[in-house]
Each structure stands twice: as C-alpha cells, then as structure tokens.
C-alpha cells in the first residue's frame, strides 16, 4: 500500500522546479551556441569547403588533362563566390590583374577554339563547381569575415614549404589589423581589385602543379578566415594555404 501511494503522489514542487531550471539552462546554452557560435562554425565550414574545392581542382586538372582555375570573386553585397572553371589553353594571353568582371567570371575567362570547318568560335569557360560564402561585419550579418595578413595575430613564418608564401596584403589595410574585416583584399595575398571588383585566380595545370595568376605571390596563395561575432574577440583565425608549384593545400 505504501509503494502504491508513492507511485500515485506524482512530482513534488522541488522536482518540478529542478526540471524547469535544467531546461532553462539547456535552452540558454543552445541559444548561446546558435548566436555566438555562428562565426566559428561558419569559419570552419568555409575553410573545409574552400580546401575541398582546391583539392578537387587539382584532381580534375590531372584527370581531364586540362587546366582548371579556382576563381575567388567578392560581390558588392560582400558575398565571396568561388568558382571552379575549366579553360583549355588557346594561346591567347590574358591580363589576369585587369579582367573585365562586368559580366560573369566564365565570360571573363572565355577562350577561342577551332571548329572542324577551320573557323574559330569563342566559348565561355566551363563552370564545374561553385561555392558562395557570406562575409560582413556585426553579430547578425553572417558570422564570417577575414583577417588582415599583416596582423600580429598570425604566427610567422609558416612551416616549410609554406614559409616562402608572403603573409601580407599591400592592396588593402583595415582600420584595425587585429579585428575581422569583410574585405577579401585584406585577407588574401594574391587578390587584386580591378574596377572595384576584388578577385583572385589560381590555376591548376594538367600535371597537378599550381600557378598563382593574380597579384604577386608566385610561391603560393593564402587566405585568412576569421569569425566576426561580437563575443569572439579572442578568435583564432584559420589560414587556407596552397603552395606553388606543388599545389598542396593545407590549413593552419
């Protein structure tokens, strides 16, 4: 009888209050992660996706026997479009530091090919993959930003063979080197700004080697990513690096 009475009595007020407190704590932790963990999560996702795209470009260039380009392009709304483009050599020289980006990158990288009847035609570069990242400033904008490569927060030098890669961005300097910035130019050592369109181009050759086509970083490319949420003042940036001519992509 005593055991049955205990089963029927239900929960005490203390037990209910304890359960409510636990639920409140769990909800607060979830909200904290969703709001304040956004920057770090997006940074890690961006680093993973960009590295995977670089590796894919190298593999495709080797397997298809044709040059593949990784094209970084920042749009006016601070989105960074990264396209994997296939473009066979046509013998025509391009001014890589002054491309016309009034149209899509695949149009800017159009090439000429011969037809069976002996005539030629202009063909847009073939888009094989695309990745879009959001960058901005402020807690609610996107959670993802870049860090100026001149910042003392970045450990120098990088381990060999990446130590030859220049960790500097002469084309753009933010107001505070140690704070996140939405500017791709500040965090990218090979990016240039033609007609107000920040961009950078990497070329993987058919033998798997890498050439940095833009800027002045022949030894390799690096982009410094960082979270930009307000609570992550002590953020740890991530550097996506790719060495030239080996084409090895590594994250530091």
Image: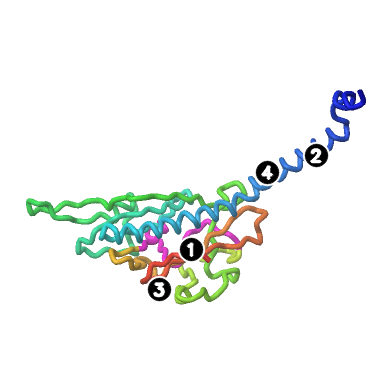
- Residue 136 picture location, percent across and down: 54, 52
Name the residue beneath numbered marker 1: 240
Circle nearer the N terminus (3, 2): 2
Examine the rendering and report whether any part of residue 186 can be seen. Answer: no
102, 120: nearer the viewer = 120
Name the residue beneath numbered marker 4: 30
Checking the image for residue 182, the label placed there is none
Q: Was residue 193 drawn as part of the magenta stretch in this picture?
A: yes
205, 233: nearer the viewer = 205
Name the residue beneath numbered marker 3: 219
Q: At numbered mark 2, what does the secondary structure look like: helix, strand or loop?
A: helix
Which tag is nearer the camera, tag 3 or tag 2? 2
Circle nearer the N terminus (4, 1): 4
Q: CA distance from mark 4 to mark 1?
A: 29 Å
Label 3 packing within 10 angstroms: few (<14), some (14-19), many (20+): some
Q: CA distance from mark 3 to mark 4?
A: 43 Å
Q: Is residue 94 left or right of residue 239?
A: left
Q: Which range is magenta? A: 179-202
Q: What residue is shown at x 34% (from left), y 59% (from top)?
A: 59
Circle nearer the N terminus (1, 3): 3
């Amino acid at each position: 009888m005593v055991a049955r009475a205990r089963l029927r009595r239900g929960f005490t007020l203390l037990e209910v209050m304890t359960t409510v407190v636990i639920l409140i704590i769990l909800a607060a932790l979830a909200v904290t992660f969703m709001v304040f963990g956004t920057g770090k999560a997006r940074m890690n996702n961006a680093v993973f996706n960009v590295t995977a795209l670089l590796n894919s470009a190298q593999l495709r260039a080797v397997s298809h026997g044709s040059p593949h380009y990784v094209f970084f392009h920042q749009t006016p709304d601070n989105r960074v479009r990264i396209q994997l483009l296939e473009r066979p050599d046509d013998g025509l020289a391009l001014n890589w530091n002054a491309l016309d980006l009034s149209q899509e990158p695949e149009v800017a990288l159009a090439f000429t090919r011969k037809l069976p009847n002996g005539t030629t035609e202009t063909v847009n570069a073939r888009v094989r993959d695309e990745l879009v990242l959001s960058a901005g400033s402020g807690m609610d904008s996107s959670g993802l930003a870049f860090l100026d490569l001149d910042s003392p927060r970045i450990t120098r030098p990088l381990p060999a063979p990446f130590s030859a890669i220049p960790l500097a961005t002469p084309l753009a300097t933010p107001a505070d080197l140690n704070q996140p910035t939405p500017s791709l130019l500040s965090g990218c050592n090979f990016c240039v700004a033609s007609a107000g369109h920040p961009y950078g181009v990497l070329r993987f050759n058919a033998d798997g080697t890498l050439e940095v086509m833009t800027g002045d970083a022949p030894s390799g490319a690096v982009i410094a990513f960082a979270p930009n949420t307000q609570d992550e003042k002590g953020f740890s940036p991530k550097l996506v690096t790719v060495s030239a001519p080996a084409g090895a992509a590594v994250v530091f």
